[in-house]
Amino acid sequence: MKTIKRAIVSVFDKSGVIHFIKALVNEFGVEILSTGGTGKLLEENGINYVKISDYTETPEMFDGRVKTLHPKIEGGILFRRDINKDVLDSQKYNIPPIDMVVCNLYQFKEAIAKPDTSLEEALELIDIGGPTMIRAAAKNFPDVTVVPSPKYYTQILDELRDSGGITDRTRAILAQDVFTIMADYNAAIANYLQRNFSPDLTMGQYFIKVFEKVQDCRYGENWDQAASYYRDLSSIYGLHNLVKLGGKEISFNNYLDIDSCMQILLDFGKDHYTTAILKHTSPNGVAIDKKDQLTSVKKAFSTDPLSAFGGIWGVNKKLTKDVADFIVNKEKIFVEVLMAPSFENEALEIIKQKKNMIIIEYGDFLNKRNDIYKNLEIRSVLGGILVQEYDSKPLIKEWNVASKKEVTDIEKEALIFAYKVSKWAKSNSACFAQTYDDGIYTIGIGAGQQSRVHVVKLAIQKAIEFGHEAELKNSVMGTDSYFPFPDGLEVAIKAGAKAVINPGGSIRDEAIIKRANELDCALVFCGKRVFRH
């Protein structure tokens, strides 16, 4: 337990600092040292303090770049109270102990997030004195309490009021947080300078990230594996912004499925009523309806009702009472996770009857697509990571109708829909889609096969199994890469496809085009492969 007699205060984020410092002074008689900007605020609020320049007998220099870099400050923080030589040095050089450092840093990350921030402005927001003080206090945490964020003010005051001092455990936890803050701060600076001076490099020489635990998962990919979800501290938006309104704790696999569902919904956007139903991170039913959410949900569910059991369901608009009633009361479907930007109150009352259903409200997430995809995608491999850009570029790189048969506007819309769904199914993938008056829906999805012809056969087989055989006639199909041979195209056309989209790029493209013409099928090359391993 350590009491606090003298504290230095120098904060960029001044929220809550007046209340905190007044309590330190009035309740515990703490002497306050402070720098110019913070000191002025203290003075305006009637708090007595000692100016750093008076305390060190050294003026602030270089337009405030040098304020606290002084032996009397750093020495007062760093000297060890239980080492006789350190104590004698402090007395010899007139360096009184500083027991608490209250300091948060210049907001460098926030500044560089603004596109108009110049290099000169960014450099001025690289804090030097603040990191030096909090690192010194963290290093000497057995004797010094460091307070690196306003979020700790209440906890510190409560502890002082309860026991008159700060416990060893609290000081150690605060020190740990300082080094995490500094790791994140330094990573932001290093990454910024790397981007600024190597703008031609999408991937820099070093990849530095700091992650913070959001929560432990119920279990990992399997029951005997431990797992946790960590958020990237450099990401403004991510799964940590989602709000769980009900249900059991989220597992590792739930997070993977939630991520996939969110990315599908991000691709489809907010224009129409979209429903996506997933299992094992691949879609097993997707539909859009221009007028009605319930119709969209029913169409998506009809694609593969068997796989929808225990699936992850997501919609792109406020979930209605009718949809909740359809899922819970009429069809009595077991849904693992139900996601929506918001929920009607009556809808929530219905779905909360299912105590284990995970209910996720994701708010305005769909408006943040550009911010979400600024970061890079990371995948772990043995001994390292693979890093790539997110596959967020426009789905259609070019629109090349390679066949003699043309494509109508309605068919074009359906082809893009089918290709978008095939993007999110595990490669190799194929998706058959059909149109109706107010929308488009999937009738058969195949995913994760080793050959392209077999994934087409699988999609057809599933369409037939779940009652969509008639709808295969005059359907459209999207597949995530080129046809290496005509067989996959032939199987799709035989089943009823009248138009097919793929990226093209095969050395046998001419043979594929020839076969499409012979079979009177429209063939579109879009120029962008959408593999998803």
Image (cartoon, rainbow, N blue to C red):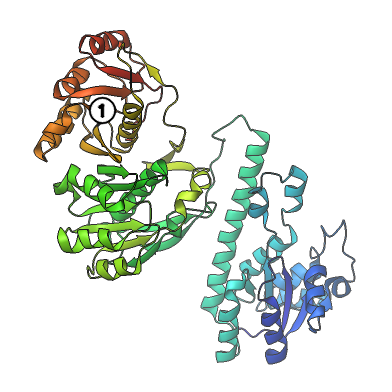
Which residue is depicted at the point 30% across and 48% down?
275
Q: Quick check: 423 above or below 355?
A: above
* Image spot of residue 292 (x, y percent): 31, 50
Residue 384 sits in quarter: top left
For mark 1, what is the residue?
Answer: 477
Q: Quick check: 27 above or below 429?
A: below
**Left or right of residue 335: residue 423:** right
The amino acid type of the residue labelled 1 equals Met
Name the residue nearer the viewer: 248 or 47. 248
Name the residue nearer the viewer: 380 or 529. 529
On-image quarter of the N terminus: bottom right
Residue 7 in view (yes/no): yes
Q: Quick check: 261 above or below 55?
A: above
Name the residue nearer the viewer: 503 or 428. 503
* Image spot of residue 41 (x, y percent): 78, 75
Which residue is depicted at the point 22% across and 67% down?
354
Residue 458 in view (yes/no): no
Dot 1 surroundings within 10 Å: few (below 14), some, or many (20 or more)?
Answer: many
Residue 493 sits in quarter: top left
Name the residue nearer the viewer: 228 or 404. 404
**Left or right of residue 144: residue 270:** left
* Image spot of residue 465 (x, y percent): 9, 38
Which residue is depicted at the point 50% across and 49% down?
368
* Image spot of residue 330 (x, y percent): 15, 60
Which residue is depicted at the point 31% across and 37% down?
421
**Left or right of residue 390: residue 178:** right
